[in-house]
Image (tube, grey):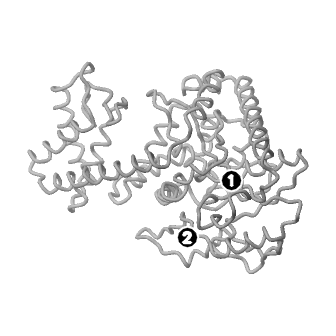
Amino acid sequence: MYKECKIKSIIKRTGELVSFDPEKITLAIYRSAAAVGGHNRELSENLTNQVIEIINVAYSEKMLPTVESIQNIVEKILIENGHAKTAKAYIIYRAQRNEMRKGKDQKEYQHGNIPYDVIWRTLWWNVEHGCETVEKLNKIVKDKDRFCQLVKEAEDHYNYRLTVAAQNIYKHIDTIRMIIISGPSSSGKTTTTHRIEDSLNKHGLELVALNVDNYYFDLEHHPKDEFGDYDFETPEALDLTLISEHLSDLIDGKEIDVPIYNFKTGMREKESTKFRLKDNQILLIDSLYGFYDGMTGHIPEENKFKFYIETLCQLKDINGNFIKWTDHRLLRRMLRDFQFRSYDPERTVGHWHYVRKGEIKHIIPNMKYADFIFDGAMPYELPVMKKHLFQYIKPIMDKYQDQPKQLDAYLRAKRLFELLDPIEAVEDDSCIPSNSVLREFIGGSELKY
């Protein structure tokens, strides 16, 4: 048990106020101790309480501490209690995090972020419909008619945005031979790909999709980590040489043999599928790494339209903080893996660090090359996902809590638990249409994936 702390918020390096969480101090101490052979979580909690005692004396709600000042207190407590080795590991860890943060800031500066006006439009829509906070969303969920009305309005807005995207594509249709839909994992690329195709069909255009997921190498060709997990969340997990060859052949009007990948076995099937791009067809690519130079860089720019999708969910949690887009997508990924790929939620959470590493290295930096940015989130979906996933999250926390090498998985599970815990669950999701992007994850879609 942690002692009561006077202050409820701290000041981040950016000047942003965030909730004070003693658990983060404990985990930082525990991780540092584990680096030098210590594995006493109770001791870590006791040391955290000593940090809280100093904070209570030195600070108040009118004078909040910064992240750096709290870290200084942690170092002081470790040294005073005779944990010099742990203090040294903590100092090293702190320095490493600082260097990582600098690198991240540089990347964000170099590559840019989602344009502000795109995020603002999402937030403003939520405000207008009274669903920008968990408290307001809960009120809607408790009234089935209001919830179904929110679903309808959100789906209508999604369809409108699809129409706008299709119009942007149609403006350049004279030179486009390939439409690439990219974005981080579980942002809704597959459903949106199908729906973009439907929209463009109304303009008399025929799109044909090439699913590059079929080009994964067999899992046996990927190294395992110490936990028996595979890192295939990189472009190199795909047969990029074969993809590049096939894309060039398709643009030239040649026929190719598309492999068939079985996600349950982790292997390609012996069979393949014949595929040719006709003169009146446009190739559609739905891939995490669609903008990656090693996959499509050899195709002339005028022949490509690059469409980027992200879950720009603008929802504030009970502490007034916007939820992380990556947590939103992790919940989606847990559902999809569980229902369609025979992966239990615990495995997905434990594997997510690979997903994030691949996104940060190979996907997000290429966002700047997009011709159009699309929001793949639905404002009503967290209450729906709670029904399907909440029961699995606490056991994941319990499993990873005392495993120093997988504390990142524990932190992810903890965030998901704290996010979903105060949210009202939707038990009846029948008013969600069968072509909704959410059906890609919860099941019941009319679309074939």
Quadrant that contains the N terminus = top left
Left or right, residue 56 beside residue 250: left
Secondary element at tag 1:
strand
**Three-letter residue code for mark 2:** Glu
Left or right, residue 208 beside residue 424: right
Foreground of the two, 403 or 242:
242
The percent coordinates of residue 326 (x first, y second) are 52, 46
Total labels drawn: 2
Q: Residue furthest bottom?
A: 270
Q: Is residue 407 above or below residue 77?
A: below
State the mark number for residue 5: none
Residue at (55% x, 70% y) in the render:
236
Residue 30 shows in this picture:
yes
Residue at (70% x, 56% y) in the render:
180
**Three-letter residue code for mark 1:** Ile
The percent coordinates of residue 379 (x first, y second) are 63, 33
Foreground of the two, 40 or 17:
17
Point out the tag, 1 or 2, that comes first from the N-terminus: 1
Residue 334 shows in this picture:
no
Tell me the residue that label 1 is attached to: 181
Distance, label 1 to label 2, CA atoms, is 19 Å
Residue at (66% x, 22% y) in the render:
129
Task: Give the quarter of the image for residue 135.
Answer: top right
Left or right, residue 333 beside residue 281: left
Task: Give the quarter of the image for residue 121.
Answer: top right
Tell me the residue that label 2 is attached to: 236
Quadrant that contains the C terminus = bottom right
Residue at (66% x, 37% y) in the render:
378
Task: Give the quarter of the image for residue 33.
Answer: bottom left
Q: Is residue 67 above or below residue 204?
A: above
Foreground of the two, 63 or 197:
197
